[in-house]
């Protein structure tokens, strides 16, 4: 992992660990070491600034559609597989030259992501209470949208297998690779948006 010299803020580590534990503690096999490593990757000295810079539209989308993505990971095997593949692809690119990475993205993803006027450069080496509250509230607001389906949701959670929990945990704990995939893998982003829109429309929450 590219985290030589990276130092994540302890409060940020605790926040991310708490959020993952709150929403995935009963549905995923989470790993604190992997969460800490990924938080370091999102800090200066971890991923390059280019890889830590994410289109603002992607950040907004992930926060606003968190609940539907969450449901998809729980109930849809194909959805989980695509997340797993996207994370592993990003891992394979880590440490390679920039020219190699660009060539692989062009070859397998068809095109590079469109630039944005609104970008966010992640730096988990710092902590902002205001930002932490904003992220927490937006995720909770998204989750509130599926509250009417609480009974069905509880039934789904009880049926999650160990294998499914392991795959979900792998994807969410390696969140920096997942974020990078959303931002820089147009094929993956398009697939997720299509599925999320379909599911969200069916539930009446899009």
Image (spheres, rainbow, N blue to C red):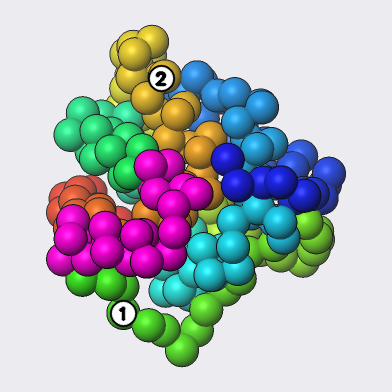
Q: N-terminal of the two: label 1 or label 2? A: 1
What is the magenta range?
90-110
Q: Residue at x 32, y 35 (%)?
A: 84
- Residue 198 appearing in the image: yes
Query: Is residue 198 highlighted in magenta?
Result: no
Say which element carries label 2.
helix
Say which element carries label 1.
loop
Q: Residues within 10 Å of mark 1 (few under 14, many from 20)?
A: few
Q: Residue furthest top?
A: 162
**Residue 163: % across, % down:** 34, 13
Magenta part mainly helix, strand or loop?
Answer: helix
Q: Residue at x 69, y 36 (%)?
A: 36
92 left or right of 76 in image: right
From the viewer's perspective, is the residue at label 1 or at label 2 nearer? Answer: 1
Q: Residue at x 42, y 35 (%)?
A: 171
On screen, residue 36 above or below 111: above
The number of numbered discs placed on residues in the rendered structure image is 2
Location of mark 1 (residue): 114
Find residue 165 and name its label.
2
Give whichever of 118, 89 is nearer the camera. Answer: 89
Q: CA distance from mark 1 to mark 2?
A: 33 Å
Classify residue 113 by image quadrant: bottom left
**Residue 92: % across, % down:** 38, 42
- Look at the image and tell me in which quarter the N terminus lies: top right
Q: Residues within 10 Å of mark 2 (few under 14, many from 20)?
A: many
Find residue 12 and name its label.
none
On screen, residue 162 above or below 125: above
Query: Is residue 91 highlighted in magenta?
Result: yes
- Look at the image and tell me in which quarter the C terminus lies: bottom left
**Residue 181: % across, % down:** 37, 54
9 left or right of 153 in image: right
């Amino acid at each position: 992992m590219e985290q030589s010299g990276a130092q994540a803020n302890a409060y940020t580590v605790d926040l991310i660990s708490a959020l993952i534990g709150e929403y995935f503690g009963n549905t995923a096999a989470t790993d604190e070491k992997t969460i800490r490593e990924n938080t370091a990757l999102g800090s200066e000295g971890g991923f390059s600034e280019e890889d830590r810079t994410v289109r603002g539209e992607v950040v907004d989308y992930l926060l606003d559609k968190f609940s539907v993505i969450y449901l998809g990971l729980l109930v849809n095997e194909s959805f989980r597989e695509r997340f797993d593949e996207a994370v592993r692809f990003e891992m394979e690119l880590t440490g390679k030259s920039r020219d190699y990475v660009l060539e692989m993205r062009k070859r397998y993803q068809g095109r590079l992501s469109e630039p944005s006027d609104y970008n966010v450069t992640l730096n988990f080496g710092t902590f902002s209470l205001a930002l932490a509250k904003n992220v927490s509230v937006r995720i909770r607001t998204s989750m509130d949208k599926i509250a009417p389906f609480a009974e069905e949701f509880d039934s789904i959670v009880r049926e999650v297998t160990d294998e499914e929990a392991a795959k979900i945990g792998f994807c969410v704990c390696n969140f920096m690779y997942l974020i990078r995939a959303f931002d820089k893998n147009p094929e993956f982003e398009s697939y997720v948006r299509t599925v999320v829109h379909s599911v969200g429309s069916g539930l009446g929450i899009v």
